[in-house]
Amino acid sequence: MVIAAPPRLLGEILVQERLTTPDMIEQALARAKTTGERLGEALVALGAVTLADVLRALALQRHLPFLGRDELPSPLPLVKNLSAKYLRQYTICPVSIEGNVLTIATADPLDPVVVDDLRQATGLSVRLVVSVPDVIAEALDRTYDGAATPLQRIVEGMEDESGAGGEEDINQLRDMAFEAPVVRLVNLLVENAIEAGASDIHIEPFEDTLRVRYRIDGILFDQESPPRRLQAAVTSRVKLMAEMNIAERRLPQDGRIRVTLHGNRVDIRVSTIPTVHGESIVMRLLDRGSVFLPLEKLGFGPRTLARFDALIRRPHGIVLVTGPTGSGKSTTLAAMIDKIN
């Protein structure tokens, strides 16, 4: 049996590459114990190395490619479910998509959470490369600041509706809800959610922002959101589609919408609840074309599937299916019953 050699220490790599000295490594380690910084952060803070030096060393340690400014594509490839806001938040950017593999440039190759999030959001395998934060930020600016998204094109030119919503503005709210840009905006949010395989759409007003999130496989992902000034128009449109009372903004309401996308009929359960900054909306998407999946398509490994199949065929006992909202409990139960029958 061949035992893989442990990865080289970061400090060892920096010294071997003649980027710093053993004495400076000792000083940085002492500082890191006091401040809680990583070794690389401590070295940069002491002026011993640059951030680019640290990232190159991390790339060597992890056997990952390091990409400079001229090696990132321009513009970057656009990837569904990866908004500019999300990419900037984690200082990452897509580099390429080849088959089922998404290559991502990151300034923090030690963060495993981002890789898991990317897999969940895109459904692709993720391959990491390393780059400097400034280089990633510039690539994102070149791509997203120069190209308007469908949502941005709809929002451009829409009037400021932030003043609507008082008791005397019911007719104005109704008129806004039927305006073509508002109709296209809400339709876009729903269509994008369905195409992304989301189970829920959350539209949440805050003091300065209107936050849109999709729940995909039980996890909430931030999406590109309309400006806060359009909150009243978006809320009114959704409530009218769900046959709710747009004049009632102080009590929770429930409604239902039925839409057809690409030949698939989708039922949408809508719930609104008042908050300090306006009404929060949750839209549960029920795609009748994708409700049923056979047990073999739910992602079980061969051994687990065989064991699970044997358990559900026993004439006694109970099987508990648990999980957060939108995680697939009903889908799993339906697949189990179909398998038994």
Image (cartoon, grey):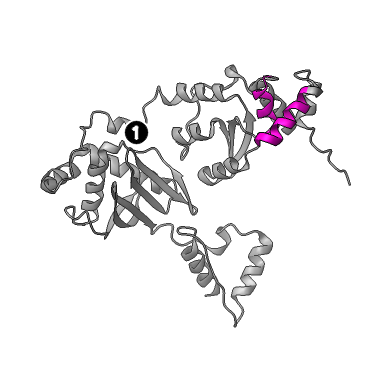
The secondary structure making up most of the magenta span is helix
Q: Quadrant of residue 136?
A: top right
The residues colored magenta run 24-47
Q: Closest to the observer: 132 or 148?
A: 132
Q: Is residue 253 above or below residue 122?
A: below
Question: What is the secondary structure assignment of the residue under circle 1?
Answer: helix
Task: From this view, report whether residue 93 is shown above or below residue 125.
Answer: above
Residue farthest right in this picture: 1
The residue at the point 48 percent across, 63 percent down is 331
Picture coordinates of residue 80, whole percent (x, y): 46, 38
Say if residue 215 shows up in the picture: yes
**In this rendering, position of residue 220 left or right of residue 251:** right
Q: Single out the residue that lies furthest toward the front.
A: 34
Q: Quadrant of residue 27?
A: top right
Q: Is residue 65 visible?
A: no
Out of 14 and 330, give the one closest to the viewer. 14
Name the residue: 39% across, 37% down.
Answer: 224
Residue 265 position by quadrant: bottom left
Which residue is at 44% across, 57% downward?
290
Residue at label 1? 150
Where residue 36 sits: x, y (%)? 66, 37
Q: Relative to residue 14, is residue 265 drawn left or right?
A: left
Please provide percent x and percent y for residue 78: 47, 32
Residue 31 lies in the magenta-colored region: yes
Q: Is residue 85 left or right of residue 129?
A: left
Q: Amino acid at mark 1?
A: Pro
- Examine the rendered structure and indicate whether residue 286 appears above or below residue 195: below
Residue 171 image offset from top left, x and y in percent: 11, 46
Work out whether 23 lies above or below 181. above
